Image: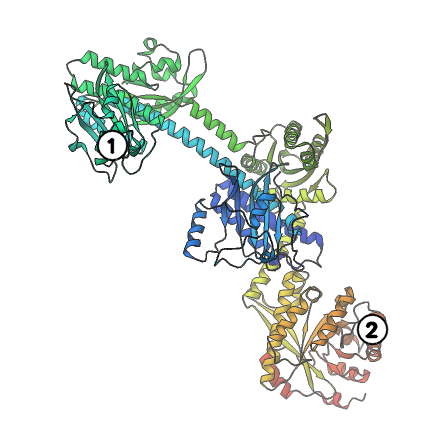
């Protein structure tokens, strides 16, 4: 199973103290529920991995896939840039890195060129005297949060962005290091906990490199096969066309054949020379030149054919002339060098054309642009085509020797392994060469005058008959069809039939001519490729691609039949220990055995597939109810848990299985179903392993709903949809305006203005609560300064959540905000925290309150009286002000208990020398009673409703308390 190797204890590393290096969505969950954070982190990781898996399935390019993976790694870790590379080895066995993904940090034209080369797979690192070289040499993770002082660092090139922190992660598969991931400049550096967090991503990176290698090997094999097929088809086509060509069309066919030969061999010139009747001269009779190459045919007429040239002496011996480089010719070829250099030839290949032990001429290829080595395939091509040319030229030269010419044509036809044939108008064999008997075993004499279709496999007859009929009816000019031809004694061969119509003098179609090319090996190769593409090579189980197809079909079938489908995500427990203890060979044998047992456990129609490593997925179809699914799951657990006798031991593993069921109340696709099963599998792991867990769709819908709400709030905050209103606080006895409470409102585009109760519970415990709280503080400070400039010195209080208050860097951010507003005076900003929140961590909150007091920021306990504070807590919490919850104030006139509570709170405040402010003053009577009890400061709708900031100065200037308040005695 692909994974990270553990970091060496001897390798230095600097671990970031706070914050981590994951993206903002995961940054501040230290005080949140660990399981919720873990699920959210897994969901984000799995979302990325699912996107990449979908990219694999739909055939995204490797470059796009690596670029997307790197983008996600950089984003998830908060890094500035990074790379994904493959470890390769040069001829001397030294490792080097080939980049498959690289952040664009180019700082010059030269570095831009390097980046562009990487995008085409051409950028490599051979100098490994660096931090990432240390990863390759040690095959272990490297964390360096001070690269400039790290002895392993090789520095950076001039102009390169500063390297402040580095994380290097090796990528393994089957115990072999395949590559590495490098990340740089996370704001807080990197820590060792991040290694475990990134294991799913690095495992996928390793799988991507394996997939890339497999694809490259497959492509090379396919290219070789395709070139061989093209070679055989070219020879068959040229031979067939030349043999069947009418005399008046020979020159055109010869010229076209030279063009095809030259293009196939990627030569600059292809030509034919013929020897004069007396053997003393040679002339260039046919020539093809690539674009931009000057013709030589006119200059090469009646050239002396004597022994002065090594070329001529070689050709006369009926030997092939092979000059890879004219400059490297021996001294005895000095004349050759001069003559060929005059034609700008750098490489030459010539094959003699011989008929009846007589040299007719030669056919050749030139390379003008560059020297090159001629392949054996090209020599064979020239030999076979030279034989065909020889026959054609001899027929052209000796029309009076028809019998001899036909024999030569027959010789050429019989020398190729392709079947050359002719059919009459009724589809019966009229001509066949010897290859027919070689391929099928049927004697030619027994085959002639028989119907072609009788020799075709029954499953292919209807299709081929329709195609041939189209050619005979002149509806198409040519056809090419791969069909199976029967063999004597049983079996068949795959032959590609290529045919074109044969016409009479009046243009009517009287038959067909063409070739049968043996493509059996190609078909077998395609079958092997098909197996590789859809099955796991180790276990023979379906792979991810075939799993997706089976799952899609199973889900469609479940919808039609109204039955259940279950997806079981299976991860083996303890497999890594077997690998580490006994080696990968034993691990592979264990996987094969367990895979076979699980396959035998399932029913016909179910599918068990291997995703990679020790992970399997089973698709269980036609389930009448959930109980039958659980029964099959128990059987899978039992099958995996059976001991496996290997290497003299009884090896034991177990399985953790995650189940997701289909259909569900919400519409889900195959990717979502797989992701649900994967999440459920992790729950089974957490619950103790060797068990199953069924995915909870209701809980998942709830989580997704909250994530969507959080995303909408975040968009609203960044889109300017939030605003502030302010509710005045007054001294009810004197009429003085002593402050205002800042209250947030959301001007929702669809739902109208929303109060905090509609959205603050959603962000509670989430990093967004901190972002929202910082925004409120920033707006409040700016408003304090704006009012002061207008002549109104008015303190402002801001509500702050416990999650925000307990953030590790709360004081740093608060000090930064105050520094941005130097006109704010001490005591003008007050932070209100709920009593219940303060009591959750009274020691920490007390330290924050004291630190804030040192920089001129006061604290108030909001909704006082609703918590469970003791006198000891009140003494330990140095809050300057207590805010009496409005529920007691509103009920005070009618409820004696509320009045008693108010008296008790005021008594406590007096005893502990705390100021008191009453919320919920909605009537004149509320104010009178509070003043009688000794509470002078109040706020509420009876004084003023919350209002925009621009209305506060005018209200403050015009407001006066009711006369009864001014006359109320203490």
Q: Which label's residue is closer to the chain start, 2 or 1?
A: 1
Name the residue at 57% across, 66% down.
717
Indicate left or right for 831 with 418 as reference.
right
In this orientation, does residue 685 appear? yes
Q: According to the image, label 2 marks what residue?
A: 875
Horizontal and vertical percent for residue 157?
49, 55
Q: Nearer the viewer, residue 442 or 584?
A: 584
Which residue appears farthest toward the front when viewing the image? 331
Mark 1 Cα shell of 10 Å, populated few (<14), some (14-19), many (≥20): many
Horizontal and vertical percent for residue 772?
62, 66
In this orientation, does residue 472 appear? no
Q: Is residue 437 above or below residue 252?
A: above
Question: Where, by quadrant of the figure, is residue 317 drawn?
Answer: top left
Q: Nearer the viewer, mark 2 or mark 1?
A: 1
Question: Where, by quadrant of the figure, is residue 908 drawn?
Answer: bottom right
Horizontal and vertical percent for residue 237?
30, 25
Q: Nearer the viewer, residue 949 or 330?
A: 330
Question: Where, by quadrant of the figure, is residue 818 drawn?
Answer: bottom right
Mark 2 Cα shell of 10 Å, populated few (<14), some (14-19), many (≥20): few
Q: Is residue 84 above or below residue 165?
A: above
Looking at the rendered structure, the secondary structure element under dot 2 is helix
What quarter of the picture does the N terminus occupy? top right
Q: According to the image, label 1 marks what residue?
A: 337
């Amino acid at each position: 199973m692909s994974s990270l190797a553990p970091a060496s204890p001897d390798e230095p590393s600097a671990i970031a103290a706070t914050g981590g290096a994951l993206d903002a969505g995961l940054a501040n969950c230290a005080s949140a529920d660990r399981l919720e954070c873990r699920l959210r982190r897994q969901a984000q990781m799995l979302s990325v991995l699912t996107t990449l898996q979908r990219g694999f399935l739909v055939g995204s390019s490797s470059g796009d896939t690596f670029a997307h993976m790197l983008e996600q790694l950089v984003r998830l870790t908060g890094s500035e840039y990074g790379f994904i590379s493959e470890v390769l080895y040069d001829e001397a066995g030294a490792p080097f890195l080939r980049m498959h993904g690289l952040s664009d940090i180019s700082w010059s034209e030269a570095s831009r060129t390097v980046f562009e080369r990487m995008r085409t797979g051409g950028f490599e690192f051979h100098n490994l005297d660096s931090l990432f070289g240390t990863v390759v040499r040690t095959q272990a993770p490297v964390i360096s949060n001070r690269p400039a002082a790290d002895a392993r660092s090789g520095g950076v090139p001039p102009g390169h962005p500063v390297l402040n922190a580095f994380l290097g992660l090796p990528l393994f598969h089957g115990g072999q290091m395949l590559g590495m991931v490098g990340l740089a400049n996370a704001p807080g550096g990197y820590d060792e906990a991040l290694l475990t967090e990134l294991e799913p991503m690095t495992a996928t990176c390793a799988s991507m490199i394996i997939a890339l290698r497999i694809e490259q090997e497959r492509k090379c094999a396919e290219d070789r096969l395709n070139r061989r097929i093209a070679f055989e088809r070219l020879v068959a086509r040229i031979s067939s066309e030349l043999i069947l060509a009418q005399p008046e069309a020979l020159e055109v066919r010869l010229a076209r054949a030279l063009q095809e030969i030259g293009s196939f061999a990627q030569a600059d010139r292809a030509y034919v020379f013929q020897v004069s009747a007396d053997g003393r001269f040679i002339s260039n009779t046919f020539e093809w030149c690539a674009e931009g190459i000057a013709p030589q045919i006119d200059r090469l007429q009646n050239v002396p054919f004597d022994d002065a040239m090594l070329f001529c002496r070689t050709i006369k011996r009926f030997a092939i002339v092979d000059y890879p480089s004219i400059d490297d010719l021996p001294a005895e070829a000095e004349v050759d060098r001069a003559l060929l250099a005059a034609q700008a030839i750098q490489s030459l290949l010539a094959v003699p054309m011989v008929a009846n032990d007589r040299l007719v001429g030669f056919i050749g290829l030139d390379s003008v642009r560059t020297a090159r080595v001629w392949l054996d395939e090209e020599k064979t091509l020239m030999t076979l085509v030279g034989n065909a040319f020889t026959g054609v030229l001899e027929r052209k030269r000796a029309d009076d020797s028809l019998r001899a010419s036909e024999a030569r044509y027959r010789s050429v036809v019989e020398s190729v392994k392709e079947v050359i044939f002719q059919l009459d108008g009724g589809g019966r064999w009229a001509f066949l060469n010897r290859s027919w008997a070689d391929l099928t075993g049927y004697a030619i004499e027994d085959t002639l005058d028989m119907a072609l279709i009788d020799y075709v496999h029954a499953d292919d007859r209807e299709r081929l008959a329709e195609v041939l009929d189209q050619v005979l009816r002149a509806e198409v000019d040519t056809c090419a069809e791969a069909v199976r031809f029967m063999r004597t004694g049983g079996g068949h061969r795959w032959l590609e039939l290529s045919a074109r119509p044969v016409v009479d003098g009046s243009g009517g179609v009287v038959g067909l001519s063409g070739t049968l090319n043996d493509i059996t090996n190609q078909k077998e190769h395609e079958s092997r490729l098909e197996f590789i593409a859809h099955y796991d090579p180790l276990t023979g189980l379906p792979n991810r691609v075939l799993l997706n197809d089976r799952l899609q079909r199973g889900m469609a079938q479940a919808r039609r039949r109204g039955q259940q489908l279950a997806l079981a995500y299976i991860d083996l427990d303890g497999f890594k220990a077997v690998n580490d203890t006994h080696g990968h060979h034993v691990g592979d044998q264990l996987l094969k055995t367990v895979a076979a047992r699980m396959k035998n456990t399932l029913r016909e129609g179910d599918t068990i597939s291997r995703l990679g490593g020790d992970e399997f997925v089973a698709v269980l179809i036609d389930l009448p109810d959930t109980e039958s699914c659980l029964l099959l799951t128990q059987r899978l657990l039992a099958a995996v848990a059976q001991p496996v006798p290997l290497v003299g031991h009884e090896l034991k593993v177990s399985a953790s299985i995650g189940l997701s069921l289909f259909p569900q109340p919400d519409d889900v696709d195959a990717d979502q179903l797989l992701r649900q099963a994967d999440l459920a599998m992790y729950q089974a792991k957490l619950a103790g392993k060797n068990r199953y867990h069924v995915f909870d769709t209701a809980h998942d819908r709830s989580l997704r709903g909250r994530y969507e709400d959080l995303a909408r709030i975040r968009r609203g905050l960044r889109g300017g949809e939030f605003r502030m209103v302010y509710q005045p606080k007054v001294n009810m006895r004197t009429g003085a305006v002593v402050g205002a409470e800042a209250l947030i409102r959301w001007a929702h585009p669809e739902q109208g203005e929303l109060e905090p109760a509609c959205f603050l519970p959603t962000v509670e415990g989430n990093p967004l609560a901190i972002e929202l709280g910082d925004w409120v503080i920033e707006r409040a400070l700016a408003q304090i300064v704006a009012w002061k400039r207008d002549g109104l010195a008015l303190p402002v209080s801001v509500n702050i959540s416990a999650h925000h208050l307990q953030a590790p860097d709360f004081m740093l951010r608060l000090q930064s905000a105050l520094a941005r507003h130097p006109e704010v005076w001490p005591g003008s900003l007050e932070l209100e925290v709920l009593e219940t929140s303060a009591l959750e961590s009274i020691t920490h909150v007390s330290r924050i309150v004291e630190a804030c007091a040192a920089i001129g920021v006061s604290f108030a306990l909001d909704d006082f009286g609703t918590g469970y504070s003791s006198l000891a807590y009140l003494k330990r919490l140095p809050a300057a002000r207590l805010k009496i919850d409005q529920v007691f104030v509103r009920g005070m006139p009618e409820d004696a208990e509320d009045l008693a509570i108010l008296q008790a709170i005021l008594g406590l405040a007096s005893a502990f020398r705390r100021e008191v402010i009453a919320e919920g003053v909605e009537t004149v009577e509320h104010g009178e009673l509070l003043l009688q009890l000794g509470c002078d400061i109040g706020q509420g709708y009876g004084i003023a409703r919350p209002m925009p900031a621009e209305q506060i100065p005018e209200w403050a200037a015009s407001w006066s308390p009711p006369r009864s308040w001014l006359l109320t005695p203490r």
